[in-house]
């Protein structure tokens, strides 16, 4: 067990976490720039004071919206316990700055100095109102859970103003515990592997209590997320404790069924699933304690070296099932129909795995491509190569990216959509902008990144100069924001002036979202889903 744990930890930290942190760096840069601008605006900007259930908060009126940042939704968490209510505060609390992000490593592998275990904050963006202010309620509420491989990120990276303005919606972005602090397990620890999800539930309860103060309707809440944030949405769909806390769900590149065979996510990676049994996390937690010189849980709770704990993050980036929050593996729960009956909007980017392909080098030879297939698919490798011959792509690296996109991202999502569409209304999408804004320095020179993993997020939120768009892309962004906010309002993305988006009825057809090109596409033909359904 020890050798497996340490090997997996090293690979996960070096691989997945590096990817997640790269994404965070780009977005944080934009967030930092916005924060500097906010600092300037606050000196002359109108202040907005609202009453929450714990006290008054003062935000900033900005361009037709009111923005409140760093609002606590729970008290500082005791390590590996469920979140507790935040005490009331006297006077007016400044809500003009983000709160600390949850404890995580920085790009240099050291503790991010802007992160802390005291991190349970959220941010609210609401349309500015007149007359009686924002107390009347009635607007849809959109709650965003960030991605980052369950190990990095923060809510403040996502600027909710575009969604709020275009859809007359209240947008909430949430911090929640990450890595070893969010998904740790230990023998006898009842809530092993679910502390981050428990934080999210606490945030949703805060929304239910306080939505009206910000002009929102507590009976019309949509939860949304991308990548691991999308998987969190899936978790809430099947969690008994999330019942009646939300009314619609948006899952972007994070379906319940996603999984990655050996060597697919990054070189020599072990097989990866979003979910882990509580017993497995408990065994990992006991080993983590031994690695840190602790033989009981109380000792681990007293470890002051947060960075040392975070080096074990790779063992704790899977929420645990067999727990009160997740009684059943979400894959099985959705397949069996054990999920909350709310409308779901779910999809992927067309070229998901091109984001991860550079981890295998700037290029692959044909022989290296075949070797990668053999590592990942064993006896199935020849059949995979027949479906994805290197000669059919501009390079073997692009062939490898197509294999990863189809086998681990898109086709599992199709199966998840099929599971849900038998019991509730589902809308399916494929984000397909072939020239989506590129993360500087991530892709090899000349590499056609396409619609890579996470690229659609900039079309919903505002990353400013870090995701520059052409006029056609700006029009697509406006269209997508309207679809998403229409869905949040009514459970149906359709609205005046938008191409019709039919509900998903099962089968291979989905809606392709690209600049100037909204159309139906056959996912089976584009992504070989019949082959993967029969093969795995």
Image: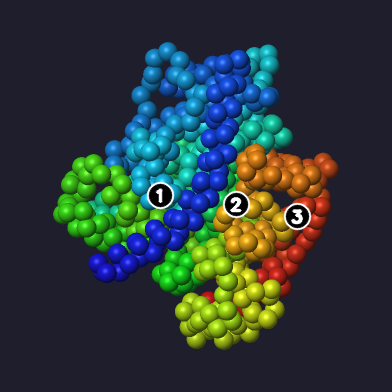
State the image coordinates of residue 232 (x, y, percent, origin top left): 49, 50
Task: Give the labeled residue for mark 3.
Answer: 514
Q: Residues within 10 Å of mark 3 (few under 14, many from 20)?
A: many
Does label 2 or label 1 sit earlier along the sequence?
Answer: 1
- Most extreme residue toward the right, as rendered? 497
Q: Quadrant of the N terminus?
A: bottom left
Q: On screen, 282 above or below 116?
A: below
Task: Give the labeled residue for mark 2.
Answer: 440
**For this view, does 36 lie left or right of residue 101?**
right
**For this view, does 517 lie left or right of residue 454?**
right
Residue 279's disc is none
Does label 1 or label 3 sit earlier along the sequence?
Answer: 1
Cβ atoms at labels 1 and 3 below 8 Å apart = no
User: Marks 1 and 3, how far apart in space?
Assistant: 36 Å
User: Marks 2 and 3, how far apart in space?
Assistant: 22 Å
Residue 533 visible somewhere in the drawing: no
Which of the 4 quarters of the picture holds residue 390? bottom right
Residue 72 visible somewhere in the drawing: yes
- Residues 427 and 466: in front is 466
**For this view, does 441 lie left or right of residue 435?**
left
Q: Residues within 10 Å of mark 1 (few under 14, many from 20)?
A: few
Query: Which residue is located at x 52 percent, y 32 percent?
Result: 123
Q: On screen, 404 above or below 186?
A: below
Query: Which residue is located at x 57 percent, y 54 percent?
Result: 441
User: Which element carries disc 1, helix, strand or loop?
Assistant: loop
State the image coordinates of residue 297 (x, y, percent, origin top left): 20, 49
State the image coordinates of residue 457 (x, y, percent, origin top left): 62, 48
- Residues 499 and 155: in front is 155
Residue 108's disc is 1
């Amino acid at each position: 067990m020890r050798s497996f744990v340490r090997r997996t930890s090293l690979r996960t930290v070096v691989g997945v976490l590096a990817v997640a942190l790269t994404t965070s760096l780009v977005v944080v840069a934009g967030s930092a720039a916005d924060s500097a601008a906010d600092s300037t605006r606050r000196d002359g900007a109108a202040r907005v004071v609202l009453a929450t259930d714990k006290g008054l908060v003062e935000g900033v009126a900005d361009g037709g919206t009111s923005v409140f940042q760093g609002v606590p939704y729970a008290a500082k968490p005791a390590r590996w316990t469920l979140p507790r209510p935040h005490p009331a505060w006297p006077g007016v609390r400044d809500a003009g700055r983000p709160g600390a992000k949850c404890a995580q490593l920085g790009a240099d592998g050291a503790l991010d100095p802007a992160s802390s275990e005291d991190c349970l904050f959220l941010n609210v963006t609401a349309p500015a109102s007149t007359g009686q202010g924002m107390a009347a309620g009635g607007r849809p509420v959109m709650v965003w859970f960030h991605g980052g491989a369950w190990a990095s990120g923060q809510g403040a990276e996502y600027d909710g103003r575009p969604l709020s303005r275009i859809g007359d919606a209240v947008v909430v972005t949430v911090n929640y515990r990450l890595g070893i602090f969010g998904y740790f397990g230990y023998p006898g620890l009842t809530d092993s592997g679910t502390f981050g999800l428990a934080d999210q539930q606490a945030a949703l309860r805060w929304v239910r209590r306080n939505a009206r103060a910000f002009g929102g309707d507590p009976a019309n809440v949509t939860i949304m997320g991308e990548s691991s944030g999308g998987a969190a949405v899936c978790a809430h769909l099947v969690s008994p404790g999330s019942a009646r806390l939300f009314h619609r769900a948006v899952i972007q590149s994070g379906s319940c069924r996603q999984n990655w065979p050996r060597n697919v996510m990054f070189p020599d990676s072990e097989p990866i699933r979003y979910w882990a049994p509580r017993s497995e996390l408990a065994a990992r937690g006991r080993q983590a304690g031994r690695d840190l010189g602790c033989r009981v849980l109380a000792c681990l709770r007293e470890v002051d070296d947060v960075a040392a704990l975070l080096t074990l993050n790779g063992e704790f980036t899977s929420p645990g099932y067999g727990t009160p929050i997740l009684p059943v593996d979400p894959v099985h729960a959705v397949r069996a129909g054990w999920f909350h009956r709310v409308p779901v909007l779910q999809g992927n980017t067309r070229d998901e795995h091109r984001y991860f392909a550079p981890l295998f080098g700037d290029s692959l030879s044909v022989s290296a491509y075949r070797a990668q297939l053999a590592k990942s698919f064993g006896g199935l490798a020849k059949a995979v190569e027949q479906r994805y011959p290197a000669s059919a792509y501009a390079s073997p690296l692009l062939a490898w990216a197509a294999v990863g996109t189809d086998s681990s991202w898109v086709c599992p999502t199709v199966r998840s959509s099929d599971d849900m569409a038998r019991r509730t209304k589902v809308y399916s999408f494929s984000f397909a902008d072939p020239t989506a804004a590129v993360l500087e320095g991530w892709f090899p020179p000349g590499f056609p990144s396409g619609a890579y993993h996470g690229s659609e997020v900039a079309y919903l939120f505002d990353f400013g100069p870090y995701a520059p768009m052409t006029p056609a892309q700006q029009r697509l962004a406006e269209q997508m924001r309207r679809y998403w906010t229409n869905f949040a309002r009514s459970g149906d993305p359709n609205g005046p002036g938008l191409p019709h988006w039919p509900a998903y009825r099962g089968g291979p057809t989905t809606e392709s979202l690209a600049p100037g090109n909204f159309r139906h596409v056959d996912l089976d033909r584009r992504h070989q889903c019949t082959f993967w359904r029969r093969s795995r």
